Image (tube, rainbow, N blue to C red):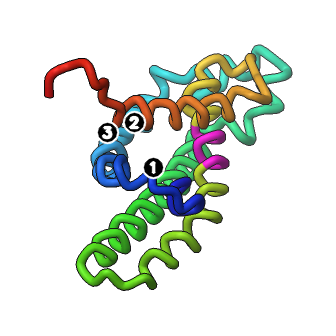
Amino acid sequence: MLQHLTGGGWGFVIRRVLEAATRTLPLILILFVPIVLGAHWIYPWTHAEEMAKNEALTQKAKYLNLTFFTVRAAIYFAIWLTLAFFLNRWSLLQDKTADRQWTKRMRMLAGPGMVLLVFTVTFASIDWFMSLDPEWSSTIYGFIFVGAWSLSALAFVVRGDGGPG
């Protein structure tokens, strides 16, 4: 989405690899099901007796409950899958037809898509990782994950010049 927004030539080299990576999202969704099913073994906030021990945790109970956790995860995946679907579809149509309308559509989706991505990754990291210790909180933690995802994506596509292949 960043490449669609900036329009730079740098993104054409890595775009196909990143698009292919987004097509693993349905598998990741399936692999997330055991996390929801096993949440009682992973997250201490799923146990009412643990939450009742601490006043701060009692106040977080409206946010840290399995039903709301699952609904939020479904929303995150729905947003990610929708963005990936349209960007991949339009990219393929752009290749097949050479019609500039697909470029324009990707650019128009990329702006709101980036905002949605940043917010959903931020909240997903809070839900899935920071809540492993429900007493701890940080205002920058989620955004650090956004940066980490970006660096991971770039590391995924980088290849050194000195090696074989």
Q: Residue at x 30, y 77 (%)?
A: 93
**Mark number displayed over residue 70:** none
Q: Is 37 drawn above or below residue 49 in the view shown?
A: below
Report which quarter residue 139 is drawn in.
Answer: top right
- Label 1: how many residues lie within 10 Å, few (<14), some (14-19) or many (20+)? few
Q: In the image, what residue occupies the spot 45% across and 56% down? A: 9
Q: To which residue does mark 1 refer?
A: 10
Q: Earlier in the sequence, mark 2 or mark 3?
A: 3
Residue 62 at what x, y percent from top left? 74, 41
- The answer to whether the residue labelled 2 contacts the one labelled 3, judged by CB atoms less than 8 Å apart, is no
Label 2 and label 3: CA atoms lie apart by: 11 Å
Range covered by the magenta-colored residues: 118-124
Q: Which residue is mark 3?
A: 31
Sequence-wise, the earlier of marks 1 and 2 is 1
Query: What secondary structure is marked by label 1?
Result: helix
Other residues around mark 3 within 10 Å, as few (<14) / some (14–19) / many (≥20): few
User: What residue is shown with label 2?
Assistant: 37
The spot of residue 115 in percent (x, y) is 66, 56
Q: Residues within 10 Å of mark 2 (few under 14, many from 20)?
A: few
Mark nearer the N terminus (1 vs 3): 1
Determine the residue positioned at 27% across, 73% down.
95
Nearer to the camera, 94 or 118: 94
Which amino acid is tagged 2? Answer: Leu
